[in-house]
Amino acid sequence: MANMSFSTSPKGANNSNQNANKTVTKIVIIVIIVIFLALVTFNCFSIVNEGFIGVKYTFGKLTADNLTPGLNFCIPFAEEIRQVDTREQVYEVIDTAYTSDTQTVQELKMKLNYRYDTSMMSDIIRNVGVDNVESKLIVQNVAKISKNEIGKVKAEELVQSRSTVQQKIQDSLTEMLKPSGIIVVSFAIENIEFEDAFEASIQAKVIAEQDALKMENKTKEKEEEAKQVVIAAQAEADSQKLKAEAEAYAIEVVQRQLANSPSYIDYLKIQNWNGQLPQFIGDGVNPFVNLETATSSGGTTSTNPPQNNNDNN
């Protein structure tokens, strides 16, 4: 006798559950596809910021080194874009050095400003590596060149001519780093410290030189004052000489004029007359008396001749 099984669920309910499961599965698959496509699309683009350039690698191989700032396309999972900072870089170091007269520079503080030559970025990446530029190129060259240049001068020259030594170091660094794609913007020796005893001697010498310069300036000032006195005296002498020569010439002209025309003396008298008549004119025998002047001055003048006390009766 055959076994028979009976289901308590209706046939329509089974079909409905199967359709619902299929729908959910389709939705999940669609969501996964959308997410995958979104991720792929997002990874197709890479943003390069301002002040940087983009470097593209394809399966680890450098294929582009000049991607501009902005949105750049790349193939997902096959290409990668990295950013390289092309702005000015700063390297600072404190080191020791020795001058040609064996003085120790205990604290030599230096600063180098540099940037990458973007036209040689591929060479920098392949030969050195952007992350290794400072450790492989900057550190050793700054130490070597600075100590070499400082070792050529005496300690006092280093103090007095720091800018000259600084410029020589910068020129040498420029020449050394340029073939590697490093552009030197500036170099500065920011601080120099010697041993206390040497700094004290330098300070004493500077003070002595300043005092000597003050004395020299005072001497020059006195010399200049003396020169001005001599110049003034010479000018006065020249003036008196010219004046005397002018007076002598004037007298000579008058004498020549009188020799040629005796009446010229009368012309000179008229020219120099102040318009007032003299009170007395003439010699002691027959003087002319200005009566008007005498009267106005309050005096009394008699017109009678003086009496002779010795007249006979």
Image (cartoon, rainbow, N blue to C red):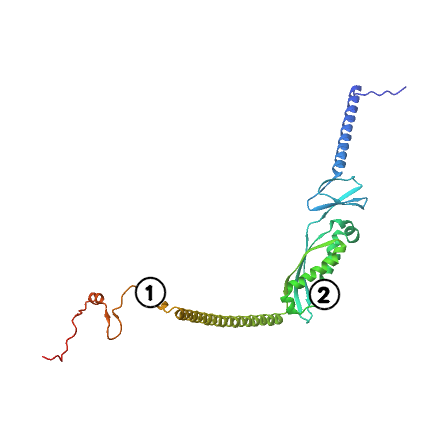
Q: Residue furthest left?
A: 313
Residue 10 visible from this viewpoint = no
Amino acid beneath label 1: Ile
Q: Nearer the viewer, residue 56 or 42?
A: 56
- Quadrant holding the N terminus: top right
Residue at screen point 70% across, 61% down: 169
Looking at the rendered structure, which numbered label has been put on residue 148? 2
Q: Amino acid at mark 2?
A: Asn
Residue 197 badge: none
Residue 169 visible from this viewpoint: yes
Q: Is residue 276 above or below residue 116?
A: below
Closer to the camera in the image, 16 or 250:
250
Residue 92 percent across, percent down from the top left:
67, 58
Quick one: SS at disc 2?
helix
Residue 273 shown left or right of residue 310 in the figure: right
Residue 98 versus residue 141 in the image, above or below: below
